């Protein structure tokens, strides 16, 4: 088996720069459960990590201190094992004393994984860690890496800390799921040969989470893999939903309620609409919950074209959660061939259309590059206006509002062959464009842009109507590095 480390070029370089710099570094790595944070740090710093501790989920203060002591004795192998420290100030003093006489020309790396799990309430851990960094680590040849799946907790308690860690983070990595190009590279690295259409089908169900993608086997189609991963009697993915949110959020009930609500509202909901659709009142609790879900990558906020912040719609973007709630939970179906049967239903067609829309929204930079507007300032939004007795409504899946006085109105279509524009569909597109002009009063040039899997079958109805066509291969292009 080849080395599983693929992609992550930007994140890898950030870690290497920290290792090669001439000053102490405090690196925060943030990302959701199963996205590969620990694997990234261990892969890049394999020979440099001198101490590592992973927090114990729901562990007590005493259990965390005992775990620290065990790790200390395993890594440093003192002639007489050190006892369990009395508190976290004592624990960090143990680390300092160990390294005082260990002068080296090479940077040492100290790795604290699942940081939020260690910092239990009233444990004094964060305060002690701040003292450790400010009095010793920041003045020595050290890289301290702190890592956590509870993304919002990491940002609020560490990145935005107003206490001892205020402005102390020197580098930050927000580790996102694999994009399509990275997913393709990951499969190739594991000798899994799948074409782009097959990869997209798997991505729509599993997303770009490396731990989930490990379940994909060579020699099986997307349908066969999804069938086995989700619908076999021994499927581990049936339990993942119940583990996912409690592992990220201290009180996950509100988070789960929002996830379930948005799983039924695929065009997303505004904050006001969420208060009517859930039991969560429009206040601080809702703000905190939405912020945590956005920071953790489960929701994506989108502006409605022409509206201010109150027009933001929150859309569920987690592929696994959507798939689980639509096809797994409360469904007593399993066994070989289940997914093949389900893929013939209208529920599948509706889901696949939404899932492909999410893929396009995740890969907006690739779409802009394919349009040749990567260097043009633009804003991505959606548009939705309900109809009434006098005027028909209009909905645009995605639009790209460009500074060069152009708006691309995007249609996102998942098909297993070339997409064909019928006479009725052509008439509908023309009506929608006209309604959009009337409702928004825009003076910009409008272009219909089709993003689809296999392209467009040109006919008399599409000519002069669809201005640009982007096929799925464009979604697999690597993103340009930002440095």
Image (cartoon, rainbow, N blue to C red):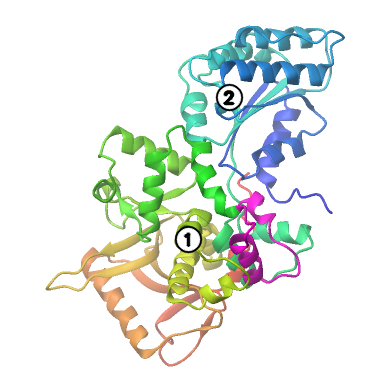
Q: Earlier in the sequence, mark 2 or mark 1?
A: 2
Judge whether residue 375 can be spotted in this image: no
Tell us which disc is closer to us: 2 or 1.
2
Find disc 1 in the rendering and name its residue: 358
Left-right relation of 412 to 258: right
Vertical position of residue 219 compared to residue 462: above or below: above
Spatial CA span between label 2 and label 1: 37 Å
Q: Please give the count of numbered marks on the rendered protein.
A: 2
How packed mark 2 is, by other alpha carbons closer than 10 Å (few <14, some 14-19, many 20 or more), is some
Q: Secondary structure at mark 2?
A: loop
Disc 2 target residue: 59
Seen in the picture, residue 53 relative to 360 is either above or below; the reply is above
Tell me: 385 left or right of 450: left
* Residue 101 point in image, percent of width and height: 82, 7
Q: Quadrant of residue 377?
A: bottom left
Q: Please, what secondary structure does the residue beneath circle 1 have? A: helix
Q: Disc 2 vs disc 1: Cβ atoms closer than 8 Å?
A: no
Which quarter of the figure is the N terminus placed in? bottom right
Disc sitting over residue 80 in the figure: none
The residue under the point 44% across, 42% down is: 293
Where does the image place residue 185, in percent across and percent down from the top left?
A: 72, 58
228 magenta-colored:
yes
**Magenta segment boundaries in residue numbering:** 208-236
User: Quadrant of the rendered structure where residue 142 is?
Assistant: top right
Residue 87 highlighted magenta (yes or no): no
Residue 476 spot, x, y in % from top left: 62, 64
Work out whether residue 148 can be spotted.
yes
């Amino acid at each position: 088996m080849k080395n599983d480390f693929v992609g992550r070029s930007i994140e890898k370089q950030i870690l290497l720069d920290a290792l090669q710099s001439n000053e102490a570094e405090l690196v925060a790595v943030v990302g959701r459960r199963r996205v590969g944070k620990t694997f990234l740090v261990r892969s890049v710093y394999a020979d440099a990590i001198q101490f590592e501790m992973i927090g114990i989920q729901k562990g007590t203060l005493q259990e965390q201190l005992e775990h620290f002591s065990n790790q200390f004795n395993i890594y440093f192998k003192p002639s007489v094992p050190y006892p369990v420290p009395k508190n976290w100030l004592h624990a960090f003093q143990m680390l300092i004393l160990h390294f005082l006489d260990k002068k080296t020309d090479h940077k040492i790396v100290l790795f604290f994984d699942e940081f939020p799990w260690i910092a239990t309430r009233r444990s004094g851990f964060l305060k002690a860690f701040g003292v450790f960094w400010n009095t010793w680590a920041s003045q020595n040849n050290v890289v301290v890496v702190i890592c956590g799946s509870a993304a919002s907790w990491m940002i609020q308690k560490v990145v935005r800390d107003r206490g001892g860690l205020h402005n102390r983070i020197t580098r930050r990595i927000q580790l996102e799921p694999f994009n399509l190009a990275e997913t393709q590279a990951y499969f190739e690295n594991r000798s899994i040969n799948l074409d782009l259409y097959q990869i997209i089908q798997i991505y729509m169900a599993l997303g770009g989470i490396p731990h989930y993608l490990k379940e994909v086997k060579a020699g099986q189609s997307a349908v066969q893999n999804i069938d086995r991963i989700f619908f076999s009697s021994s499927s581990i993915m049936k339990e993942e939903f119940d583990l996912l949110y409690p592992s990220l959020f201290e009180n996950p009930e509100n988070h789960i309620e929002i996830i379930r609500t948005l799983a039924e509202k695929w065009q997303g909901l505004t904050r006001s609409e969420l208060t009517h659709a859930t039991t969560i009142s429009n206040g601080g609790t809702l703000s905190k919950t939405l912020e945590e879900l956005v920071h953790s990558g489960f929701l994506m906020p989108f502006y409605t074209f022409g509206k201010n912040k109150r027009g933001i719609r929150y859309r569920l973007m987690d592929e696994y959660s959507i798939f689980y709630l639509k096809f797994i939970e409360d469904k007593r179906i399993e066994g070989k061939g289940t997914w093949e049967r389900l893929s013939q239903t209208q529920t599948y067609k509706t889901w696949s259309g939404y899932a492909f829309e999410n893929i396009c929204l995740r890969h907006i930079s690739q779409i802009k590059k394919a349009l040749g507007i990567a260097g043009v300032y633009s804003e991505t939004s959606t548009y939705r206006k309900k109809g009434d007795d006098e005027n028909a409504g209009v909905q645009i899946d995605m639009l790209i509002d460009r500074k060069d006085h152009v708006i691309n109105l995007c249609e996102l279509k998942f098909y297993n062959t070339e997409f064909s524009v019928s006479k009725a569909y052509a008439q509908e597109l023309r009506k929608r464009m006209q309604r959009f002009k009337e409702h928004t009063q825009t003076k910009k040039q409008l272009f219909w842009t089709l993003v689809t899997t296999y392209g467009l079958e040109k006919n008399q109805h599409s000519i002069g109507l669809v201005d640009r066509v982007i096929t799925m291969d464009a979604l697999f292009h690597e993103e340009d590095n930002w440095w």
